[in-house]
Image (cartoon, rainbow, N blue to C red):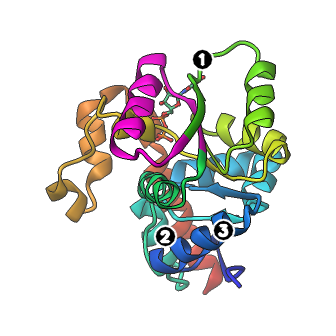
Amino acid sequence: MHKNRVNILGTEFDNFTTKQFHKYLDDDLDVKANKFIVTPNPEIVLSARKDTNFSEIVNNADYVIPDGIGVIKGAKSLGTPLHERITGFDTLQYLVEAANRKFSKVYLLGAKPEVIEASAEKIKKDYPQVDLVGYHDGYFKDEADIVAEIAEKQPNIVFVALGSPKQEIFINKYRKTTDAIWIGVGGSFDVFSGTKKRAPKFFQALNLEWFYRLIKEPTRFGRMLAIPRYMNLINKEKKSRK
Ligand code: UDP
């Protein structure tokens, strides 16, 4: 079905459209399937190259979707283009809407206490049919209580925002506690809650969201060096495939 994957420097991306992906998610929710979504960007592709365990976790996820314009550019450059970029943030948004349509049970984990609180409030206010069964910030010492709560409440969707690779490791370890769609959403709650602004449409249209984020958070500069390193590897790979 969706196992039509494209290998970008070792990470295997699903190649489908947003529309097809959303249809799979709707079907998964209807049958209470246990699914794991990862949303790699170039930085995650590079981390996976360095860490075999992490790479296995990513490649064994049910959905590996291309978050980040770098992934789309890399795929095209290697001659194996992907349909389109599908971001973790847009997927979070779609799943919350789907949960509202289907009266699904949702659990939120991660981000700072005030961010996750504001995200929970937003869901209660704007998506009143979502059954928000619990939420917890991402700065905990012991995860046992959180896992026990998830096991008890049996949510249909679990959003995990602990940053990478923490969130993927967490999901991989605990996904059997409830048959849900589990997704690592990185910093998405910061945007969803309104704490941080997503790049204006202008930046989005020019594929310059990364640049907007860099201006807003200059401390991300070190992390962004992953992009030229990634492009360099793409170019090398392209030459070696010729
Ligand atoms: N975070 C967390 N616990 C931690 C480390 C990070 O909950 O121990 C949260 C952090 O507050 C932020 C998210 O994880 O909301 C990671 O954000 P980042 O911008 O690094 O993720 P990206 O979107 O770039 O993947």
Q: Residue at x 27, y 44 (%)?
A: 198
Q: Earlier in the sequence, mark 1 or mark 2?
A: 2
Give the residue type that dot 3 points to: Asp
Front-lying residue, 227 or 205: 205
Q: Amino acid at mark 1?
A: Tyr
Please provide percent x and percent y for residue 96. Answer: 47, 52
Task: Residue 116: tell me if it is visible.
Answer: yes
> Which residue is outermost to the left?
202
Instruction: Give the residue at x 56% y 56%.
Output: 39
Mark 1 CB within 8 Å of ligand 1: yes
Whole-number angstrom distance, CA of label 3 to CA of label 1: 32 Å
| Helix, strand or loop for disc 1 | loop
**Mark 2 vs 3, N-terminal side:** 3
Label 1: how many residues lie within 10 Å, few (<14), some (14-19) or many (20+)? few
Q: What x and y, as percent, mark residue 35?
A: 72, 59
Most foreground residue, 100 or 91? 100
Which residue position is annotated with label 3? 30
The quadrant in which residue 118 appears is: top left
The residue carrying mark 2 is 74
The picture places residue 212, in percent across and down from the top left corner, at 24, 43
Identity of the residue drawn at 73% across and 24% down: 146
- Where's residue 36, x and y in %? 70, 56
Residue 123 vs residue 182, the one in the foreground? 123
Q: 6 left or right of 22?
A: right
Q: Quadrant of the N terminus?
A: bottom right
Q: Is residue 9 visible?
A: no
Given the image, on which type of amino acid does mark 2 rest? Gly
Residue range corresponding to the magenta coloring: 106-131
